[in-house]
Amino acid sequence: MAVELDKQDSWIKDRIKIEEIVKYQDKGKDFIPEEEIVSKLELNLKKEPDSLKIKDILSKSLSIQTLTPDETAALLNVKDKKLLEEMKRTALEVKKKVYDNRIVTFAPLYLNNLCVNNCVYCGFRRDNKNIKRKILSLEEVKKEIEVLAGGIGHKRLIVVYGEAPETGIEYIRKTIETIYEVKVKTKKGWGQIRRVNVNAPSLSIEELKILHKAGIGTYQVFQETYHHNTYARVHPEGTIKNNYQWRLYCMHRAFEAGIDDVGIGVLFGLYDWKFEVMGLLYHAREMERMFNVGPHTVSFPRLEPAFHAPFTQNSGYKVCDEDFKRLITVIRLAIPYTGMIITARENARMRREAILLGCTQTDASTRIGIGAYSERYDEQEEKRQQFLLGDTRSIDEVIREFAQMGYITSFCTAGYRCGRTGECIMELLKTGKEGKFCKLNAVLTFREWLDDFAGEETKAIAEKILNKEIEEIKQNIPDIFPTFIGYYERIKQGERDLYF
Ligand code: SAM
Ligand code: SF4
């Protein structure tokens, strides 16, 4: 499985294309001005921001405009309890305005855990000799998809890769193509993965063009930390990932390669959380400035314990629950149009609370051991996983809980297949128009999932939500209603994948 060491070294040496970094920089500088960020945070820390100013900022969020760094720094430093409550209420209102009462669900699929990097917080790091290494073959990928699409009912995946010559762009391309090919018979119809989002290493323009051609949804890369010195400390020298700029500019390269749907993120717990929220904001604003399109999603994983990664227990910047809720609220308000992903790293209680602060996407029935879906083992096994999960509930339980909270779970994958990406989706999100398509597609895909996969109790609770949604469509979009209800009836008869 492993390639010879000198071949590996030369592969590592050629990975970073300096010219694909400097071309985007302004006089050799990147777009994360650390001193400016620190001074903005300190200024607001010294003086509690006044409530009128905060209310103005909140109304700007409500009109779905990206906040400025000063406005974001002010929100990060609010201490007044009443104002904090108002911020949380507004965050949920912003979410409802853009995404209504929908929660999009997906599953992560880890394809391999080989990695030439040595990130101190990750169980897959090169020097961890205790972990079982594995690369899924295409046959094994098929087996995973048969369970994900045919047994659980997922339609969207985020596929996750380490960085190694054995699992370079050709492996990534072939696995994605294999995933799209699998079609499985279900109780009333058939199941298939219709959208593959990718969480992969930072890639070159040439490689990103290959990803684009393979028909991916979102290309996701987390900066981990925007703080330069911390970045250098947690990504040891001599590794590819040690290069902050190569990682920072990978979204610029993605756009150049034709991928206009990208996700950014921070691994919270590596450095001061307020600084990191500012980093995310600067990144989003840079993308808006350069491409007129901000990040489609923002992720904010918290550092979790990982096997033989002692750093995860004593990083010095662990984020407590209160601060975590605070940072979710501020991200929602600062980048109001973006999708926000809360994962099963968090426990069920925190995931519930995060949804009420404006998160829009979450995973369910999650297994992150390599090959874990088809082997159907339920226990977490730290030797096979990147880190340990906080919530291993089944999709049926998660969806039932959302339905009880008044949320409809969407498996919609229509957006990118209808060309609603990039500038087009930004416009639709900011004006609340994307919600119209999403509502229709959410109902249609939820109907599919209920008929094929739901337990009786979940079905009974979810039907009430569906009936309410259908009534709303009838009232609010009467011109489309006849086509919609035609699709809905056909899906009940076993047809699949009808969308707007
Ligand atoms: N290898 C690729 C990379 O580093 O970008 C992609 C996959 S990596 C497996 C996905 C993400 O998991 C990382 O970007 C990091 O934010 C997160 N992660 C790594 N170790 C973690 C830990 N101990 N707890 C929580 N999240 C972690
Ligand atoms: Fe490799 Fe990614 Fe883990 Fe770093 S975070 S060791 S790059 S898998």
Image (tube, rainbow, N blue to C red):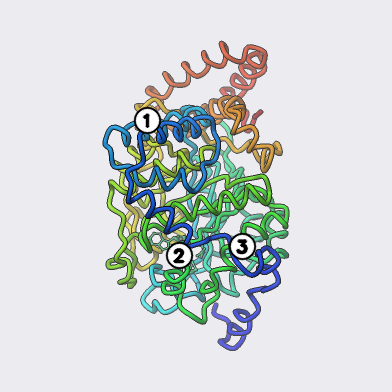
Percent coordinates x, y for residue 479 in the rendering: 67, 13
Q: Is residue 435 left or right of residue 320?
A: right
Q: Compared to 335, does 497 lie above or below? A: above
Marks 2 and 3 sit apart, C-alpha to C-alpha, by 15 Å
Q: Earlier in the sequence, mark 1 or mark 3?
A: 1
Rendered image: mark on residue 327:
none
* Residue at 36% across, 52% down: 345
Categorize mark 2 by other alpha carbons within 10 Å: few (<14), some (14-19), many (20+).
some
The residue singled out by tag 3 in the image is: 249
Marks 1 and 3 sit apart, C-alpha to C-alpha, by 34 Å
Front tag of 2 and 3:
2
Q: Amino acid at mark 2?
A: His
Ligand 1 quadrant? bottom left
Label 2, secondary structure: give it: loop
Marks 1 and 2 sit apart, C-alpha to C-alpha, by 30 Å
Q: Is residue 467 left or right of residue 427?
A: left
The residue singled out by tag 2 in the image is: 227
Q: Amino acid at mark 1?
A: Arg
Categorize mark 1 by other alpha carbons within 10 Å: few (<14), some (14-19), many (20+).
some
Q: Compared to 104, does 294 lie above or below? A: below
Q: Amino acid at mark 3?
A: Tyr
Categorize mark 3 by other alpha carbons within 10 Å: few (<14), some (14-19), many (20+).
many
Q: Quadrant of residue 273?
A: bottom left
* Residue at 39% across, 79% down: 129
Q: Earlier in the sequence, mark 2 or mark 3?
A: 2
Percent coordinates x, y for residue 401 in the rendering: 35, 32
Does label 3 point to a residue whose CB lies under 8 Å from ligand 1? no
Q: Quadrant of residue 48?
A: top left
Q: Quadrant of residue 441?
A: top right
Label 1, secondary structure: give it: helix
The residue singled out by tag 1 in the image is: 89
Does label 1 point to a residue whose CB lies under 8 Å from ligand 1? no
